[in-house]
Amino acid sequence: MIDSVHELQSLVATARAEIARCAAIDALEQLRVRLLGKKGEITQLLKALGAMDPEARRVAGARINDAKGALIAALDERRAALDAQRLASQLADDAIDVTLPGRGQSTGGLHPITRVRRRIEAIFRSAGFSVADGPEIEDDWHNFAALNIPANHPARALHDTFYFPDGRLLRTHTSPVQVRVLQQQPPPVRVIVPGRVYRIDSDMTHTPMFHQVEGLVIDTGVTFANLKAVLHEVMRALFERDVKMRLRPSYFPFTEPSAEVDISCVACGGPASNSGCRVCKNTGWLEVAGCGMVHPNVLRAVNIDAERYTGYAFGMGIDRLTMLRYNVGDIRMYFENDLRFLRQFV
Amino acid sequence: MKVSLQWLREWVDTGDDVPALSHALTMAGLEIEAVERVGVDTVLEINLTPNRGDCMSIAGVAREIAAVRNTACNAPAMDPVKAASEALFPVRLQAGGACPTFAGRVIRGVRAGASSPGWLQERLRRTGVRPISAVVDVTNYVMLELGQPLHAYDLEKLRDAIIVRFANPGEQLRLLDGRTIELTSDVLVIADPHKALGLAGVMGGAASAISDATRDVLLEGAYFSPAAIAGRGRRYGLVTDAAQRFERGVDPHLAERAIERATQLLLECAGGTAGPTRVTRIDRSDPSPMPIRLRHDRIGRVLGVTLDPVLVEALLRRLGMHVSSDNESTDGRAAAGQAVEWLVIPPSWRFDLLIEEDLIEEVARLYGFDNIPEQQASTPAQIAPWTERRMRNERAADLLVDRGYHEAITYSFTDAVAQSILFSDTALALKNPISAELGVMRLSLWPGLLQALRENQRRQQARVRLFEIGRRFSGATGAEDEVIAVVASGSVVAEQWGEHARDVDFFDVKADVEALLRLTSDPQQIRFAAQRHPALHPGQTARIYRGDRPIGWIGSLHPERQRALDLTYPVVAVEIETDVGFEALIPQYAEISRFPAIRRDLALIVAEEVAVESLLNGVRSSAGKLLNDVGVLSVYRGKQFDKGKKSIALGLQLQDTSRTLTDPEADALVAQVVDHLVRQFNATIRDK
């Protein structure tokens, strides 16, 4: 047993070296069994203590247990290092090229006219308007006569109309829905009507089908001053900038007074910019809508007391507003549905 | 309408430069569309609205400028020409109020073939009128100057008398432009006792026309009522300067003055001897404007601004209106807080002022729309309905966009031939289409979407997924219903790394449809039944039902139709009616089980004809309410099965909401299901 101190020291030193050299978790596990297993070298030494006298056993026991503790610590430490190494290696193997594009279904997009139509609807809804609609195939009465445009009226020449053999027609504007709404609903009325309209016209700046949004407000105490305020607010909201607005006297048979609505050019910033702007033809102004106070004859056609109620109506071209909003140069792109065009709008 | 500024300034000179004048006119309702320099002159192009026939002349525009700029209009001196002979031609008015006034004058011995002087021709040209001969040019000049259309007849070709009457039905007339037209009884004509000579107020006839040989002339300056002229020219494809003026209204007091002016000019440039101006009238027809009541407070209620009554009167008078008031003094009455009202008689040249609002517009126009302040309405808040019982079109569109579709907008009219490849119904045809390719109303959104798809394929876009929400039109009645339609062609996903390339098929698109209809919160009611559609592949087509109601179709485009439509790749198409299709339920919470579920899989062999849907229904009905879910795990056909058989694997999830289900209970339930399937579908169970 005299040598046992040296033996123990040598055993520990050898084992420590082996643990440090150990490069694999399996090998480290085998080493643990060899040292600390049931038949392990340290275990054998502890078993041999039983043959000693109590004093020697106490001293030797303490020494062996110290050695055991040191070896367990060394094994654990090595295990932790090997685990860390293994994880690092696995993580390195798992590395991907994060710059590769994502996989799966791509998304499509909304038509630009729909984008602007939705904006217009949302803006008007926030101002308390609701959204109505009406038929695209109309009769003469709703499209013209009830709107104070009798047969042979010169204003009809401004509406190149598609007709069907039975005398019906494709609505030339969304205004007939004014009449339909008023036939169904007593004042107060506060609606907009977005929809398709049709005129025989096809060139660089016209398509035979286009989109309008009609607005109609009928109530007591509705004035031209209110109309101006609403249109200006809507234009500011739609273009998200402080556009200027002016109303020019004009003529629509179903409104009196009537006006064209101009806004300061959204491309060049408006009058006096003198930038040679092609969008506004250097006038600084863009015509974006027609409007006016609802003609008493229209109210009478639907049995509304024109003395008690007043109202305003307006109509704007969604396709044109879309051109201005997204800088679309060619109106004919709208209905060609070229994916290279559509992909520009999500 | 084109207006020479030089000419205009002979009538009114405000001292404005061109931009200032243009702006003033534009903001008063006479929009200056273009300004063109012509030598030392400037030509203004005015976009005249149809109500302002009174401005279709130099005199009219000058009058308007004077009113807008609050200045005087100075008509050049035009003295009547004394008669140098007694020559007259009889005129008989037989059309009542349609033509109550007719001024005629005979001028004999004009130089045959004379031309008008250069200055006159130049003014015509600047206004866009082609010079022809002295007589014709003079009548045009006076029309452009004063606004009164005139007509000149070759007196030698007139017989007995001029008669103004309505045409006899079927009566023929050869026009100046050489065409012969057939008349109806609502068309006003100038005739002699034997035949019609011209379309009154629109165009003269060939038989009495001026020529280079004409020596004796009858000048006509008539008043035709707008109602008698409106639309008549357009009916025969004629849009003439005369018709445009008469149908908008020509000052009934202008005819005589215009004849005098024309006589003066004609004698100057072609000589001749004038007879007296003879005005034939029907006295009981008076086209003078009616007085209109105008209330001061109504102006405020329409415009939203209170204008000084004195200003209102002044503005109206500037426009040539006769304004009278019961009130001793408008000023005093207004000051005393009393209601002010006027009786206003519009000038004879204004045909567009009929009611109080027309006058309010005139006041506002001269006051300046810009000077009316913007004012927020104090509308009481109204809550608009916002239903959850319909899926919104916006939601449907968003879903398809998120699943890879682009929204298209196609024309509502389409090509009859291409449409007939897909549909046997006769479409509603337009009477006057813009082209044959856009000649009939669409029966479906497919023709337009397939055309868009084809054009995209031609532009090297092999993968195309489009949808549209819009109306289709019944061929018989034109009845409109809104549908959502989808076409898909090409690879199921865009070409990319890590995804197996595969063309889109029925089931890919069906998944999109299912996702769409799931938004109604009512997926149990949606059913796909194999049916035939003329446009679609007979073996790959389903009609879509919601409960008992058919709501649409899904299918692969029939290969023959695909070829006929010149489509390069196969297409899957869908169309669903939104009316019933988008009705939505309001979701109702159902209890979630806290107990574990048991999964059992079944592999069945059934005949090919057995639809998976009926198998699933069989499972559902036989399993009862412990069945939480059933899914199709695989569909397999192979050599190990008899021909005409297929193997289907189903996954059943069983669960109770009040306790944990035991294995023996699950086994018993599955046995019950199998028993049912064996009996109902002659199914055999495949050993695993």
Image (cartoon, helix red, strand yellow):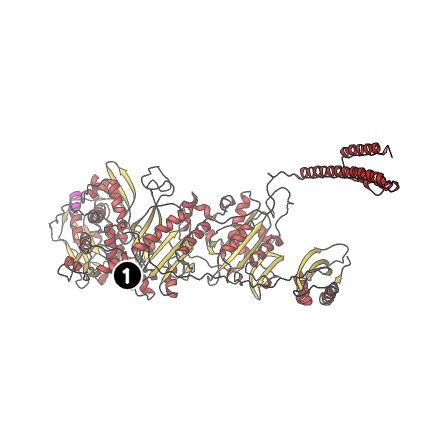
Residue located 65% across and 64% down the image: B657
Say few, some or many: other residues with alpha carbon within 10 Å of mark 1 (under 14 / 14 to 19 / 20 or more): many
User: Closer to the camera, B248 or B93?
Assistant: B248
Give the magenta-colored segment's residue range. Answer: B262-270
Q: Residue A204 placed where, x, y %?
A: 41, 44
Residue sitting at the far front: A55
Residue B511 in sight in this render: yes
User: Is any part of residue B131 visible from this angle?
Assistant: no
Q: Secondary structure at mark 1?
A: loop
Residue A25 horizontal/vertical position (percent): 76, 39
Q: Chain of mark 1?
A: B
Amino acid at dot 1: Ala
Nearest the viewer among B619 and A72 is: A72
Residue A340: x %, y % from top left? 51, 43
x and y percentages locating residue A177 in the rendered image: 39, 60
**For this view, does B614 lie left or right of residue A157?**
right
Q: Is residue B541 magenta?
A: no
Q: Is residue B549 left or right of residue B153?
A: right
Circle 1 is placed at which residue position?
B167
Q: For this rendering, which residue is in front, B539 or B139? A: B539
Q: Is residue B607 shown left or right of residue B355?
A: right
